[in-house]
Image (cartoon, rainbow, N blue to C red):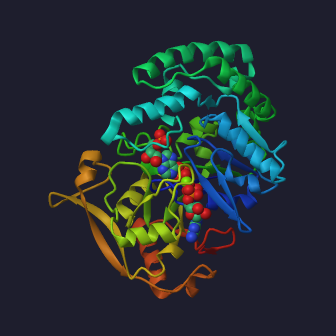
């Protein structure tokens, strides 16, 4: 049984919170894409855990957490995440594994990410500056360095020195300080010692899990609208975020995937630049940002806020083969008098789909809205669908009908127990 949780919008839908919920019954929780540009926040018994690399399933003691080969690793972030969990008394030994094939985010990747962003000036993309794009581009141009080399230290020293010398020349053209090879090698020798016990052949581990009929939960990072191929490129992230990436990023054959769970936030948020047709730049947007605490887990940046964009979510469902939907953060809409939902786009008076638009069109489209009457009650304590305010029920039922995909869970708060099961 393989299930996958993916974001259907522009990230931060609450994937981590849903993975935490579902991994109570999972034997394995697996990351397959992205890096520490992801920020997945989980709240258990009032305590907050912001995960960037370690799969969110780790908080369930019987779940084994795996970082698959498709993930790019910043070892500074990974080692500090390991430390935070260990200090918290969470055992990682024999239940946390990292693929040898993971590519490393190296200091020059972070420096290059920033240097390119600064050079773009007004046209900056708003990346997380975590070195994601440069790390993946080195991977596809055969200049990457993996955990494999790190383990074989002499190979790492050789490749790291060679790459840093070249990257330093590029950094110089940006007028950016160069990377000190000796200093960095010392740091990496330290990281190596910490991560070595967790490195394994994760393909073999997951293949055996499949053979033993174990329950595997795949944790998507980012979201469909940031997918390298299907986003409004270049307003994308550098990895594929759709379920197709699971085969390449963890070695699990696509036909083994039974459930594709799309997480839909009851409104939209986006971090970084790029088109955002249903964006709210008024006080309603500000209110949702404040009540929804919409500030990045990774960068702390205020997230841009907008109405739910069902044209985008419909596309996400179609391209990802979503079999069920989980709605999150609907509690944040309590008190909004009139709630709008985007049903499609118009450009120069004509209908235009998301899939046939690039960023130039998406910057100009006007959404077609349907308006709903809101509700004022605090719904975070509701545990049964019929107990929700009628207008809230109508909003949820409309989403289900429009998308033609069943809604299985509605999350009404950030805490583990704050949700309603529908089917
Ligand atoms: P992810 O990147 O998709 O895992 O989402 P983030 O963790 O970056 O952002 C979602 C935020 O909303 C986190 O702070 C969660 O604790 C919180 N959250 C998730 N679901 C709900 C919900 O249903 N209601 C409320 N109020 N907060 C939620
Ligand atoms: P989670 O998993 C929201 C966005 C960045 C930027 C673009 C490219 O928490 O949902 P990158 O650093 O990846 O090269 O930046 O992608 N982005 C995210 N936005 N949530 C995320 O992850 C994101 N990961 C990347 O803001 O617009
Ligand atoms: Mg996030």
Outermost residue on the left side: it is: 348
Look at the picture and state if 140 lies above or below 11: above
Where is residue 109? Give x, y as percent: 53, 29
Answer yes or no: is residue 237 visible: no
Tell me which corner region of the image, top left, top right, bottom left or bottom right, holds residue 347: bottom left
Look at the picture and state if 318 lies above or below 102: below
Query: How many discs appear?
Result: 0
Where is residue 192? Give x, y as percent: 75, 28
In the visual, does 63 lie left or right of 164? right
Where is residue 26? Give x, y as percent: 73, 55
Residue at 48% over, 86% down? 376
In the visual, does 315 lie left or right of 82? left
Residue at 65% over, 73% down? 418
Task: Quarter of the image for the C terminus: give it.
Answer: bottom right
Answer yes or no: is residue 182 visible: yes
Ligand 1 shows up in the quarter that is: bottom right
Tell which of 306 and 29 is nearer to you: 306
Tell which of 70 and 120 is nearer to you: 120
In the visual, does 308 lie left or right of 295? left
Residue at 42% over, 50% down? 225
Where is residue 161? Give x, y as percent: 61, 14
Tell me which corner region of the image, top left, top right, bottom left or bottom right, holds residue 74: top right
Residue at 28% over, 55% down? 353
Look at the picture and state if 15 lies above or below 28: below
């Amino acid at each position: 049984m393989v299930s996958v949780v993916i974001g259907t919008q522009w990230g931060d839908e609450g994937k981590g919170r849903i993975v935490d919920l579902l991994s109570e019954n999972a034997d394995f929780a697996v990351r397959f894409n992205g890096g520490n540009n992801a920020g997945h926040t989980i709240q258990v018994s009032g305590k907050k855990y912001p995960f960037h690399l370690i799969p969110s399933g780790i908080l369930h003691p019987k779940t084994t957490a795996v970082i698959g080969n498709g993930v790019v690793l910043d070892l500074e972030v990974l080692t500090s995440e390991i430390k935070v969990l260990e200090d918290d008394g969470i055992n990682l030994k024999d239940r946390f594994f990292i693929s040898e094939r993971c590519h490393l985010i190296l200091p020059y990747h972070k420096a290059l990410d920033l240097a390119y962003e600064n050079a773009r000036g007004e046209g900056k993309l708003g990346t997380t500056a975590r070195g994601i794009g440069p790390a993946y581009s080195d991977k596809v141009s055969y200049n990457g360095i993996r955990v494999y080399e790190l383990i074989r230290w002499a190979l790492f020293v050789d490749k790291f020195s060679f790459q840093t010398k070249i990257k330093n020349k590029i950094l110089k053209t940006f007028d950016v300080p160069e990377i000190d090879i000796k200093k960095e090698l010392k740091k990496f020798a330290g990281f190596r010692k910490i991560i070595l016990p967790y490195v394994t052949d994760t393909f073999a581990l997951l293949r055996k899990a499949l053979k033993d009929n174990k329950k595997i939960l795949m944790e998507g990072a980012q979201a469909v609208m940031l997918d390298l191929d299907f986003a409004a490129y270049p307003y994308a992230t550098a990895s594929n975020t759709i379920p197709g990436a699971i085969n390449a990023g963890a070695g699990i054959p696509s036909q083994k995937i039974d459930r594709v769970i799309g997480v839909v936030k009851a409104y939209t948020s986006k971090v970084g630049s790029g088109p955002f047709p249903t964006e709210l730049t008024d006080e309603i947007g500000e209110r949702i940002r404040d009540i929804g605490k919409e500030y990045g887990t990774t960068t702390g940046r205020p997230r841009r806020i907008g109405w739910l964009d069902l044209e985008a979510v419909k596309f996400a469902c179609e391209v990802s083969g979503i079999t069920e939907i989980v709605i999150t953060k609907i509690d944040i809409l309590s008190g909004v008098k009139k709630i709008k939902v985007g049903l499609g786009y118009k450009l120069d008076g004509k209908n235009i789909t998301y899939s046939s638009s690039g960023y130039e069109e998406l910057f100009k489209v006007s959404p077609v809205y349907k308006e709903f009457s809101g509700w004022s009650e605090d719904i975070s304590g509701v545990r049964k669908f019929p107990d929700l305010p009628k207008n809230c029920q109508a909003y949820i039922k409309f989403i289900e009908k429009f998308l033609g995909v069943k809604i299985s869970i509605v999350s009404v708060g950030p805490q583990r127990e704050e949700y309603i099961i529908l089917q």
